[in-house]
Amino acid sequence: MPDTSPRRFWLLRIASAAAAALLNACKGALEPSSPPPPASAPAEAVSPGVIGPIPAPQGSARNSSAATARAYRQDGATHLYGLNAERIYKGRMPPLLYAIGVLNVQIDQVGRVTRLEWLRAPRHAPEVVAEIERTVRRAAPFPAPLRLGKVVYTDTWLWHKSGRFQLDTLTEGQD
């Protein structure tokens, strides 16, 4: 009989992430909202395959109630996964990866990316460095760090030669 403990772990992790997202959505509904955009603004098309925040004029539609940068890292990784679902490597990563990078991301009070700083850049793969930076900047606005005001969080990017990736925060492991 196969061991189901890893499956149970991931199911619990997904369930807790869904519960946290629902809690954030309910909390956001209780807060006063900004005025609706002018009627002359064209509506943006939303891709049905992407799960994630809907950008608003002042910031992300989601808020983060994280009290530490480490806790915010989970919100940032979930946000990036939601916007890049088709680019996430599914399953366990192979033993040899094309690139690994460690990046600090500074987020302001409304979720804008204000600074990127490489702690460990994959210098042998400058195209990966550029793509990761593009991916992070394109994902803005991130969830607004309500309790922190602004935040600098660190995550490790695990890059496969196919161009798909996982973040260490949400990785499915490595063989």
Image (cartoon, rainbow, N blue to C red):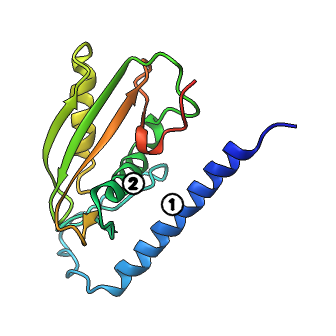
Q: Position of residue 137 (x, y in %)?
A: 21, 44
Amino acid, disc 1: Ala
Residue extending furthest toward the top? 124
Per the image, label 2 sits on a secondary structure element best described as helix
Q: Residue at x 28, y 48 (%)?
A: 139
Q: Quadrant of residue 128?
A: top left
Circle 1 crowding by C-alpha within 10 Å: few under 14, some 14–19, many from 20: some
- 84 to 173, vertically: above or below: below
Contact, CB < 8 Å: mark 1 with mark 2?
yes
Circle 2 crowding by C-alpha within 10 Å: few under 14, some 14–19, many from 20: some
The numbered mark at residue 17 is 1
Amino acid, disc 2: Gln
Q: Position of residue 102 (x, y in %)?
A: 28, 33
The numbered mark at residue 74 is 2
Viewer-nearest residue: 58 or 175: 175
Q: Residue at x 37, y 82 (%)?
A: 29
Q: Earlier in the sequence, mark 1 or mark 2?
A: 1
State the separation of the CA atoms marked 1 and 2: 9 Å
- 50 to 103, vertically: above or below: below
Q: Position of residue 131 (x, y in %)?
A: 26, 29
Q: Quadrant of the N terminus?
A: top right
Q: Residue at x 26, y 16 (%)?
A: 125
Q: Residue at x 25, y 42 (%)?
A: 136
Per the image, label 1 sits on a secondary structure element best described as helix
